[in-house]
Amino acid sequence: MTKTVRIGSGLGFYGDAWEPVAASIERGGVQYIASDHLAELTLAILQKDRQRDPALGYARDLLPMVLRLWPSMRERGVRFICNAGGLNPGGAAQALRVALATKGWKARIAVVTGDDVLPAMTSGADAPAFAHLFSGAPLASVRDRLVFANAYLGARPIVDALAQGADIVITGRVADAALFLAPLVHEFGWHLEDAATPAELNRLAQGLAVGHLLECSGQGSGGNFGSLGTWMAVPDLAHLGYPIAEVSDDGTAVITKAPGTGGRVNFDTLRQQLLYEVHDPHAYLTPDAVLDMSTLRLTDLGDDRVRVEGATGRRRPERLKIVAGFHDGYKAEVTWGFSWPDAWSKAQAAVGIVKTMLAERRVPHDELFVEYPGLSSAHGALAPLPAALDDLNEVWVRLALRTREKSAADGFGRLFPWMGLSGPAYTCGFHGLHNTAELLGIWPTLIDRGQVEPHTQIQIIET
Amino acid sequence: MKIRLADIAHARSGDKADWVDFGLFAWNATGYAVLAREVSAARVQAHFEPWLPGEVQLWPLPNILAIKLVLKDALQGGGARNLRLDNLGKAMAAALLRMEIDVGEDELARCRAEPRVGWWPHDPLAAQ
């Protein structure tokens, strides 16, 4: 019988649910859980944590998640791979070691570091490299405002950590799909850096496709399934199971989910996930290989099983992608309701008053953004407004101010309370007096492997 | 006749820095032929023009009856600085499904009659 490896999807982002992961461990027969805690935005959130406390900077849901799952993983020999280390993998591992030790539980934890490239981007008198990947803008415009910069590492350090017997692997920024490719490389002994033949490259591509299908947890099994009416055909979202991949040594895979769980794994739910957050589908770039999705076939086998095969791969790119964040001002926002009669006209009048105050007081700001939640915000000008606007029962107005001055953001909410007594009548539900948020711009760019990979380290911690 | 993309397709959107990306999916081969003919980068850019000016890229993927679209510069600099409630563009796929396209009546009938690819135990469209 051909060997297969079963990998279960862990979290799809920082804040996701882990009960579906428990179902995959207890009923799904998985050998590995690969858990992606880092959306593109997440490092910006973790950076704010780290500013408050240098011991933080990792995804804090790691601890309660592992404490919930570890007994059943331990019992079944399931190994756990995650990027929850965020900006501080060492801190995450230490915190987890303490949490496990408190319970008296033994685990071998591997920490992968070396993705932090902020020094490389900010040192040196002149850094002509690191131009914006999309716009080509030079780094100089944001260099002194950078607050984090991390390169996407590939599967290699995770493969090595598994070879060293790690039960739990904690990384910082790695390519999402690498979390899933690594156990396949480890189990099947696939060529990685030295993959050269079409067969070797194609099975890496299959591994990446599997990773991409599983990396967003429930989105791969019918969650967030978008279409007119047919989303209702996805059963029991309350108990949705996360996708599980059963992968063969040639890279072909069947995607399924644990028995007795809700959700749906079929041709439609999987292809929505396949294209999610992908740019050129002929060249999905990862540190380990380039995946071409145009040859891939998804065959619905029924009963929540879909075969994935035919992905083609090309040799890995020369350079690694970096995602960096730079300080980009502050936001303050206010939400406010106005009731019938004349709700729409009163909301418009109030917005006009606020604009007058901002101008007369010369409040420094780059943008005042106004939208009407519940009436039209999601689709902007593409959404038609009803004809009888002033017959509406109520209107919500949301005003968001973007400014480079923290004091302007802090003071924005103060422009509003007086209107409760002295502005248009029948207001309700004012929110936003103290809510300044720091804004971070994202700076995608590239870096030579030689500036990153020699600095990658694996440290083993045992409880 | 005019229909909306929502009548014959499904979609999901996501964010990549300042770009919004879409997967747009036909339910069957006839629907895909309509999408391939009617959905061009220029048409999608015109659809989003009142709101977002960025360039549009498009890749047809007949192997999964899908079209991949990317809208550049669509997120006010990215999710971590976007002032909109929908800062990650998750609802933008629904905005795409508002787009109107032209189909013949026979063609639309075939789109609806042809079985959908993939396995659904209870096909809500077929039940209509």
Image: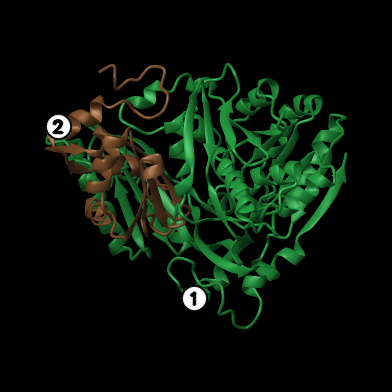
Chain colours: A green, B brown
What's the distance in space between the residues labelled 2 and 1, CA to CA? 54 Å
**What subunit carries mark 2?**
B
Q: Position of residue A135 (x, y in %)?
A: 42, 69
- A272 shown above or below B43: above
Q: Position of residue B53 (x, y in %)?
A: 28, 60
Let me know if marks 2 and 1 both belong to one chain.
no
The quadrant in which residue A376 appears is: top left
Left or right: A257 as drawn, with respect to A359: right
Crowd rating for badge 2 (residues with CA inside 10 Å; few <14, some 14–19, many 20+)? few
Left or right: A343 as drawn, with respect to A65: left
Q: Position of residue B3 (x, y in %)?
A: 18, 37
The numbered dot on residue A31 is none
Q: In the rendered image, is residue A125 in sight?
A: yes
The reply to whether callout 2 and callout 1 are in contact (CB within 8 Å) is no
> Label 1 amino acid?
Pro
Which residue of the protein is positioned furthest toward the bottom in this rendering?
A125
Please report the residue visible at 85 percent of the width from the left and 32 percent of the height from the top.
Answer: A102
Q: Which residue is mark 2?
A: B106
The numbered dot on residue A138 is 1
**What subunit carries mark 1?**
A
Foreground tag (2 vs 1)? 2
Please report the residue visible at 29 percent of the width from the left and 44 percent of the height from the top.
Answer: B96
The quadrant in which residue B78 appears is: bottom left
Left or right: A326 as drawn, with respect to A347: right
B114, A161: nearer the viewer: B114
Left or right: A237 as drawn, with respect to A211: left
Tag 2, which secondary structure? helix
Q: Position of residue B97 (x, y in %)?
A: 28, 40
> Label 2 amino acid?
Asp
Look at the image and tell me in which quarter the C terminus of chain B lies: top left
